[in-house]
C-alpha cells in the first residue's frame, strides 16, 4: 500500500459508534428530504451560505453531563432525557427592509423549511421516547400501546386512601425514567393530529399550529414563541382563578410570587383539600395548576365530580411522587429546563415572568426549594 501524503485520511479507519442515537438532531442534520415521509417539493437554497439565528433554550448552571440521553438513562438520573425537550430551531437571520423581494421570498421559504425540519425532529423524538419507555411502562403495569400517564394504576384509589401506599412503584424507577414515561405518553397522544397537519400543510404548519396551540402539539415540537405564549395565558388563567377563590372565601388574592401565594398553592396541593373542595373550588384549583383552560367553563360544576376532581387528584398524586424524588436528589441537581417545568406544574410558572436567563432560573430554583421545604412537613410527602 502506498504511503499516505500529508493531510490524507486513511479510509479503512472504522467510524466510532454514536452514543447519542436518540438525542434531538439539529435541523441541518435532517436536510435529506427524500428519506422523510414528510418531505415536500419546495426547493430553496437561499440559506446555504447565510448566517442563521439559532433559537434555543437558556443554558443551565447545572453541568450538561447530568442531563442524560436515552442510551445512558438510569435510575440515578433526576433529569429527563434531553430528547423530551424541543430541538434547536435554526432559522435564517432577518433581512433588511431594503432587501430585494426575491431574497425575501427565498428567506420565507427557508424559514418554512427550517420549521418543517424542526417539527420532523420533534416527531422522531416522540417515537424514540415512547419506544424507550415501553419496558418501563410494563414495570408499572401500564398498557404498552395505550398512552396512559402514570400514576394511574389499578390501585390508584387505594393509593389515595392509605398512607402505606406512599411507597409507590414509580419511586423505584428514578425521576428521569419516570418523567420519560409521563412525557412520552403525553406527546404520543398529540402525535397523530399533529402529524396529519404536518403532512397536509408542510412548510405552512407554523401558520396553523397557533390556532390549536398545545392541545395538538407535542412538547418536542413547541417553538419558543409558542411556549412563551402558553405560559402567559396560563398566568392569566391562574390569576382569574385565584381572584374567584378569594372572592368565595372573603379574602384577598395573593400577589404573584409572594410567600402567601406559595402557601396557598401548598394548601391546594394536598389530596385532602381536593377531596373536600366544592365543585367551583375544584375547577379553580384545576385552573391554578394548569389542568383546565377556564375555571368557570360551561357545565364545569356538573362535570366536577366525574371529570375534574379525579383529574386534580391524579395531578396531586403525581406531585407527591415528584416532590419525594426531587427531595432525594436536591433541587440543585435539576437542569434549568426541569426547574421551569417543575415550577409550572406546581402553579408558580409566572414567579420569574419579568426576568430572563440566569436570573429567572435562580428565582425559580429558590421558589422550588421553598415549596419543597413547606411540602416536606405534610403527611403526604416524606423524604
Image (cartoon, rainbow, N blue to C red):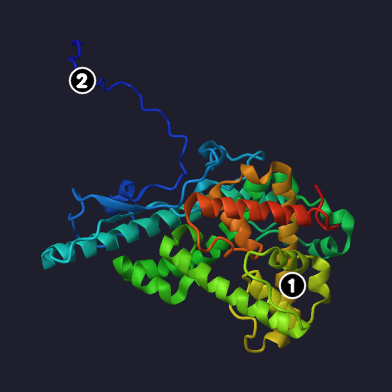
Q: Residue at x 64, y 81 (%)?
A: 295
Q: Nearer the viewer, residue 166 or 185?
A: 166
At 33% from the left edge and 49% from the top edge, which residue is drawn?
A: 30
Residue 121, x across and y down, in percent: 40, 54
Callout 1 secondary element: helix
Q: Is 210 on the left-hand or right-hand side of 64?
A: left
**SS for callout 2:** loop
- Number of on-image labels: 2
The CA distance from mark 1 to mark 2 is 66 Å
Q: Position of residue 231 (x, y in %)?
A: 52, 67
From the viewer's perspective, is residue 302 above or below residue 216?
A: below
Q: Pointer 2: what residue? A: 8
For residue 158, which numbered disc appears in the image? none
- Report the disc number at residue 310: 1
Q: In this orientation, does residue 304 appear? A: no
Mark 2 crowd level (few <14, some 14–19, many ≥20, 10 Å Cα): few
Amino acid at each position: 500500500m502506498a504511503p499516505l501524503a500529508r493531510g490524507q485520511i486513511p479510509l479503512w479507519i472504522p467510524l466510532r459508534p454514536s452514543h447519542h442515537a436518540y438525542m434531538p438532531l439539529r435541523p441541518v442534520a435532517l436536510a435529506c428530504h427524500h428519506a422523510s415521509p414528510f418531505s415536500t417539493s419546495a426547493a430553496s437554497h437561499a440559506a446555504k451560505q447565510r448566517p442563521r439565528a439559532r433559537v434555543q433554550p437558556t443554558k443551565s448552571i447545572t453541568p450538561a453531563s447530568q442531563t442524560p440521553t436515552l442510551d445512558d438513562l438510569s435510575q440515578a438520573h433526576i433529569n429527563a432525557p434531553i430528547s423530551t425537550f424541543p430541538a434547536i430551531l435554526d432559522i435564517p437571520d432577518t433581512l433588511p427592509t431594503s432587501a430585494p423581494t426575491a431574497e425575501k421570498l427565498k428567506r420565507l421559504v427557508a424559514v418554512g423549511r427550517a420549521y418543517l425540519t424542526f417539527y420532523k425532529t420533534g416527531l422522531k423524538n416522540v417515537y424514540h421516547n415512547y419506544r424507550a419507555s415501553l419496558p418501563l411502562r410494563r414495570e408499572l403495569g401500564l398498557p404498552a400501546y395505550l398512552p396512559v400517564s402514570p400514576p394511574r394504576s389499578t390501585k390508584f384509589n387505594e393509593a389515595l386512601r392509605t398512607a402505606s401506599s406512599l411507597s409507590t412503584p414509580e419511586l423505584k424507577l428514578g425521576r428521569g425514567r419516570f418523567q420519560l414515561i409521563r412525557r412520552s405518553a403525553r406527546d404520543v397522544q398529540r402525535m397523530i393530529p399533529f402529524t396529519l397537519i404536518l403532512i397536509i400543510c408542510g412548510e405552512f404548519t407554523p401558520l396553523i399550529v397557533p390556532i390549536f396551540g398545545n392541545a395538538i402539539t407535542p412538547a418536542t415540537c413547541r417553538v419558543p414563541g409558542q411556549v412563551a405564549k402558553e405560559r402567559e395565558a396560563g398566568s392569566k388563567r391562574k390569576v382569574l382563578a385565584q381572584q374567584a377563590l378569594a372572592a368565595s372565601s372573603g379574602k384577598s388574592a395573593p400577589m404573584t410570587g409572594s410567600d402567601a401565594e406559595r402557601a396557598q398553592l401548598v394548601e391546594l396541593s394536598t389530596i385532602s383539600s381536593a377531596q373536600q373542595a366544592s365543585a367551583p373550588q375544584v375547577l379553580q384549583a384545576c385552573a391554578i395548576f394548569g389542568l383546565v383552560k377556564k375555571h368557570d367553563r360551561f357545565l364545569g360544576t356538573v362535570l366536577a365530580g366525574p371529570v375534574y376532581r379525579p383529574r386534580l387528584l391524579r395531578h396531586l398524586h403525581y406531585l407527591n411522587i415528584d416532590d419525594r424524588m426531587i427531595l432525594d436528589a436536591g433541587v440543585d441537581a435539576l437542569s434549568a429546563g426541569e426547574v421551569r417545568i417543575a415550577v409550572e406544574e406546581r402553579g408558580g410558572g409566572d414567579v420569574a415572568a419579568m426576568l430572563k436567563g440566569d436570573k429567572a432560573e435562580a428565582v425559580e430554583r429558590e421558589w422550588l426549594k421553598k415549596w419543597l421545604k413547606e411540602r416536606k412537613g405534610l403527611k403526604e410527602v416524606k423524604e
